[in-house]
C-alpha cells in the first residue's frame, strides 16, 4: 500500500507491517512459493514499461539496459531462490542432533537507489516475500513514481495469491526526517540499505540491524597473458551498460607497459577517446566535486559524448568512453575516484608488481571490500593478484558490472545488494539474497560428546596443570 | 640485511630478506645511529623484502620521528608489503612509492 511522507504516519506504516508479518508467519512453503512466482511474473511482464518509467523519471542511463536489469532482478533472482526452503524445518542432521528452523525476521525497510530503482525494488520484494517478511519501499526522491508503480504491480500480484495485506508498502513522498524515523522505529526488523554512503551510514547508526553496501572503485588489471581484444570488448560491454551506473562497473584500467600499445589501440578501435592533459583538467572540473570529494551527480549515467560536450572537450560524436591516462591515485587525481559514468582512468605499469601496487592503491581509494577485476590466462598470476586485493568479488575475465551482480557470467548469487565486508562497513562480503533474510533457529538435541566425558573439573582447578598437561590427559587414547 | 648508502643527496637504506623481529633488532641500533647523524632525506628501499614485522613498522615510525615525515619515504615496495602499509594506514603518514 502507498504511504505519504508524513512522519506522524510512520507508526501506522509499521503497525500495518507488523500485522502483515504476523499473518505471514502462518503461511506454508507452498503458498509462499506461489506468491513469489506470481510476483516474479508480474515484475518480469512489466520490465519494459518500468524500465522506460525509470529512465524518464531519473534521466539516468539507457532504458534498454534497465530492461535487462529488471529481467535479471526478476527472472534470475527468482531462479536462484525458487527452490530455497524458507518455511519451517529447512535442515536436519540426525547424527549431530541439530534441526534448523527458518523464521521470518519481520518488517524490512528497503532503501532504493536512484541508479537502479525498479530493478532493486523487484529484487528486494522477491527476497522479502520468499522469506515471509513484509517490506516497506523507501525510494530515492528522484525515483518515487517508478518505484511506486513497481511496488504496486508486485503487491497486486502477491495479494491475488493470498499474501497478507500490506506485505508491500511504499512511500509516495520522501523526506530525510521520515526516513530517519522509519529506520529507527522499534518495530522495524531489518534495513536493506542500497545507496550512497551517507544513507547507508545513517541506516547503521539507527540501531536497527542493517544489510548495507559500500562504495566501489573497481580497478581492472589487464595482465600480459590476457586476451586483449576480448578483455577490452568485455570492459566496453560492462562500462557502457546503463551508461556506467552500476557500482561494480570498471573505474580504472591498469596494464603492463609491454601490452599497453595493443590495449590502447583496441580501446581506440572501440571509440575510447584518450584525453589530453588539458582535457583531463576540464573533465576533472566537471565530473568531480573536489569540495565534497564526490562525483558530480549531474554526469552520472550520461553518455560519454554528452559529458565531453558539457566539459568543453572536443571529442568525436561517436565517442563511447572517455579515457584519462593518469600518473597516480588519490585526491590529487580526481578521476582516480569512483565515477558512475562512461569515464575510465588508465594506468601503465612497468611490471606485474607495479600493476598490483596500483590496483591496491585504487582498491583502497574508496572501494575497499567491493569488487576488483582481472583479465588473465595465467593461473598463478590470478591467484597472486587475488590474495592482494580486499574485495568481496574478484572477477576474472568477466565484465564487472554484470559479473558482480551474479547469475549471468558466473555462479555468484544474483543480487542488487553487494556486500562489501567490514572494509566497506558491511557485515558480509556476499551478494545479499533471500537466505540472509531468515532467522535460523536450531534445535540441539543431547548427543554423546567426548569432551563432556573427559571433562574433569578437578584438573581445571589445579593451577599446576598447564595447557599441555591438560591437553595430554584430555586426548589420551583418542 | 641492511646496506646504507648516500646517493643523489639522499640516504638510501636498502633492506633485504624478511624483516622479522630478530632481523630488525639486529639492525636497529646501527640504523638509528645513521638516521640521527644524517641531515639528508631518508629512503627505505624494500625491493627484495617480502615480509615486514611489527618491529619494522616501528622502525619506519622511528625514522619519521628522527628525520620528519616530509624527508622520509619508502620505495620499491613489493605488493604484499604495500598491502601491509595500506592496512596499517601508513600510506596516510608516509610517502610510499
Image (spheres, coloured by chain):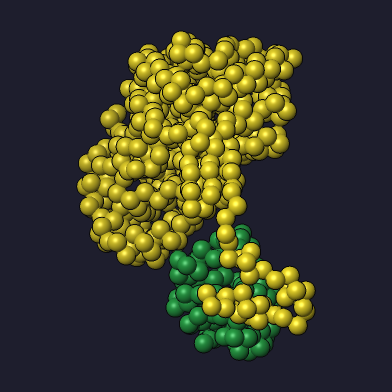
Q: Nearer the viewer, residue A236 or A9?
A: A9
Where residue A423 sits in the image (x, y, percent)? 56, 50
Q: Nearer the viewer, residue A159 or A365?
A: A159
- Does residue A409 appear left or right of residue A372 in this picture? left
Q: Name the tint of chain B in the rendering.
A: green
Where residue B60 sits in the image (x, y, percent)? 62, 74
Taking A182 as reference, is A348 above or below it?
A: below
Where residue B16 sits in the image (x, y, percent)? 48, 82
Taking A205 as reference, is A156 above or below it?
A: above
The residue depicted at 68 percent of the width and 34 percent of the height is A208
The residue depicted at 52 percent of the width and 74 percent of the height is A478
Q: Nearer the viewer, residue B42 or A301?
A: A301
- Quadrant position of residue A244: top left
- Quadrant position of residue A33: top left
Taking A448 as reference, is A418 above or below it?
A: above
- Residue A146 visible in rendering: no
- Quadrant position of residue A453: bottom right
Taking A197 as reference, is B58 above or below it?
A: below
Where residue A313 sits in the image (x, y, percent)? 39, 34
The residue depicted at 46 percent of the width and 57 percent of the height is A389
Q: Name the tint of chain A in the rendering.
A: yellow
Amino acid at each position: 500500500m502507498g504511504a505519504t511522507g508524513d512522519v506522524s504516519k510512520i507508526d501506522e506504516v509499521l503497525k500495518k507491517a507488523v500485522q502483515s508479518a504476523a499473518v505471514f508467519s502462518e503461511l506454508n512453503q507452498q503458498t509462499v512459493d506461489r506468491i513469489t512466482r506470481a510476483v516474479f511474473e508480474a515484475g518480469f511482464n512489466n520490465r519494459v514499461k518500468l524500465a522506460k518509467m525509470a529512465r524518464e523519471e531519473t534521466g539516468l542511463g539507457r532504458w534498454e539496459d534497465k530492461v535487462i536489469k529488471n529481467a535479471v532482478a526478476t527472472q534470475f533472482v527468482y531462479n536462484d531462490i525458487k527452490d530455497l526452503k524458507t518455511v519451517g524445518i529447512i535442515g536436519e542432521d540426525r547424527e549431530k542432533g541439530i534441526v534448523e528452523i527458518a523464521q521470518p525476521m519481520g518488517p524490512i525497510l528497503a532503501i532504493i537507489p536512484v541508479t537502479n530503482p525498479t530493478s532493486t525494488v523487484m529484487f528486494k520484494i522477491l527476497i522479502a516475500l520468499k522469506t515471509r517478511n513484509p517490506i516497506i519501499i523507501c525510494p530515492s526522491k528522484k525515483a518515487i513514481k517508478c518505484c511506486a508503480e513497481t511496488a504496486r504491480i508486485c503487491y497486486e500480484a502477491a495479494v491475488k495469491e493470498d499474501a497478507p495485506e500490506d506485505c508491500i508498502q511504499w512511500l509516495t513522498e520522501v523526506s530525510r526526517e521520515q526516513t530517519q524515523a522509519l529506520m529507527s522505529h522499534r518495530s522495524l526488523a531489518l534495513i536493506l540499505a542500497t545507496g550512497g554512503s551517507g544513507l547507508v551510514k545513517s541506516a547503521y547508526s539507527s540501531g536497527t540491524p542493517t544489510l548495507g553496501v559500500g562504495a566501489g572503485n573497481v580497478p581492472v588489471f589487464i595482465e600480459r597473458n590476457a586476451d586483449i581484444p576480448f578483455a577490452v570488448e568485455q570492459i566496453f560491454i560492462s562500462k557502457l551498460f546503463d551508461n556506467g551506473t552500476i557500482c561494480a562497473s570498471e573505474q580504472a584500467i591498469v596494464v603492463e607497459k609491454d601490452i599497453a600499445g595493443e590495449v590502447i589501440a583496441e580501446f581506440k578501435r572501440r571509440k575510447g577517446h584518450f584525453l589530453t592533459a588539458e582535457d583531463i583538467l576540464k573533465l576533472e572540473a566537471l565530473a568531480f566535486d573536489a569540495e565534497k570529494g564526490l562525483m558530480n551527480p549531474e554526469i552520472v549515467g550520461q553518455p560519454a559524448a554528452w559529458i565531453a560536450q558539457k566539459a568543453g572537450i572536443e571529442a568525436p560524436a561517436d565517442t563511447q568512453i572517455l579515457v584519462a591516462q593518469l600518473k597516480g591515485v588519490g585526491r590529487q587525481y580526481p578521476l582516480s575516484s569512483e565515477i558512475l559514468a562512461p569515464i575510465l582512468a588508465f594506468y601503465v605499469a612497468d611490471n606485474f608488481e607495479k600493476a598490483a601496487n596500483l590496483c591496491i592503491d585504487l582498491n583502497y581509494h574508496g572501494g575497499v571490500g567491493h569488487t576488483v577485476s582481472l583479465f588473465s590466462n595465467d593461473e598463478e598470476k590470478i591467484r597472486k593478484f587475488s590474495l592482494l586485493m580486499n574485495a568481496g568479488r574478484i572477477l576474472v575475465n568477466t565484465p564487472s558490472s554484470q559479473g558482480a551482480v551474479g547469475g549471468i557470467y558466473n555462479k555468484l548469487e544474483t543480487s542488487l545488494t553487494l556486500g562489501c565486508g567490514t572494509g566497506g562497513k558491511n557485515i558480509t562480503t556476499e551478494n545479499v539474497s533471500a537466505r540472509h533474510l531468515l532467522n535460523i533457529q536450531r534445535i540441539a538435541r543431547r548427543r554423546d560428546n567426548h569432551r563432556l566425558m573427559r571433562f574433569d573439573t578437578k584438573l581445571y582447578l589445579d593451577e599446576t596443570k598447564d595447557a599441555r598437561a591438560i591437553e595430554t590427559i584430555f586426548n589420551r587414547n583418542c | 640485511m641492511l646496506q646504507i648508502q648516500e646517493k643523489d643527496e639522499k640516504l638510501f637504506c636498502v633492506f633485504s630478506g624478511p624483516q622479522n623481529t630478530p632481523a630488525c633488532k639486529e639492525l636497529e641500533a646501527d640504523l638509528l645511529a645513521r638516521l640521527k647523524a644524517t641531515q639528508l632525506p631518508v629512503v627505505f628501499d624494500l625491493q627484495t623484502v617480502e615480509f615486514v614485522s611489527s618491529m619494522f613498522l616501528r622502525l619506519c615510525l622511528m625514522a619519521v620521528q628522527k628525520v620528519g615525515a616530509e624527508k622520509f619515504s619508502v620505495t620499491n615496495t613489493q605488493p604484499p608489503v604495500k598491502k601491509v602499509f595500506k592496512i596499517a594506514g601508513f600510506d596516510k603518514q608516509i610517502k610510499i612509492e
